Image (tube, helix red, strand yellow):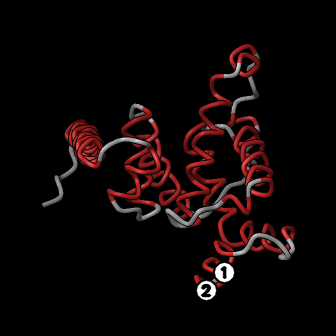
Amino acid sequence: MNNLQFDYLKHITGGLDRAAVLDELMREYGKDVWNFAYFLTRQRELADDIVQDVFVKVYERLYDFRGQSSIKTWLLAITRNQARDALRSAWLRKVTLLPAWLERDVQKSAEHEWLDKMDTEQVWKTVLDLPRKLKEVLLLSAHYGFTMKEIAEMLSITEGTVKSRLHRARAAVNRKWAKETAVCGEEEWV
């Protein structure tokens, strides 16, 4: 959906097929919403549920969008709130879902694919091991490309806090990688 359509969406009060707009938003941003939900929860099934809840809320509040931020920022803010609510729920704290390793297919792949996958998993594990506040700002900045101002608005914190958290997140990742390269005897990147 292009910016002109979103600008039009901000100014209308009715007459546009909500289902068509929702379908377009889901096609455009569905993957980003799911990835962010998974990043925050680290559970596939829960991320699926959160995405459904997010788009139900979007459908209900479609005409409440005021255009004070981008559509993507609005969707990811809703996703963050849904993920926080889900993680706080009593039901989730009492029910243990199947571990992710049970869901994986056991298929052998080519050596280079395996090495690439291991590198990717190691990077994500390092990021996912960060405290929630640090990994949120790192993901929103590095993966989604949001500005400091957009992140601050989305998380309801100051830009200075975003900068501080982002700096601490990057430093923590660098420290972790420095330790791992020292243990493995690998050369440091210059």
Label 2 sits on what residue type? Leu
Q: Where does the image place residue 142, in percent across and percent down from the top left?
A: 38, 59
Label 1 element class: helix
- Give the residue at mark 2: 4
Residue that badge 1 annotates: 8
Placement of 33 over or under 101, stated as above or below: below
Residue found at the very far left of the displayed protein: 190
The residue depicted at 41 percent of the width and 43 percent of the height is 127
Res 184 visible: no
State left or right for residue 179 relative to residue 113: left
- How far from the left and from the top, in percent, is residue 154? 47, 50
Answer left or right for 95 relative to 8: right
Binning the other alpha carbons within 10 Å of mark 2 as few (below 14), some (14 to 19) or many (20 upward) gives few
Amino acid at circle 1: Tyr
Q: Answer yes or no: do the residues labelled 1 and 2 have beta carbons within 8 Å?
A: yes
Image quadrant holding the C terminus, namely bottom left
Above or below: residue 119 compared with residue 133: below
Asked if residue 6 is positioned above or below residue 159 in the image, the reply reads below
Identify the element where label 2 is drawn.
Answer: helix
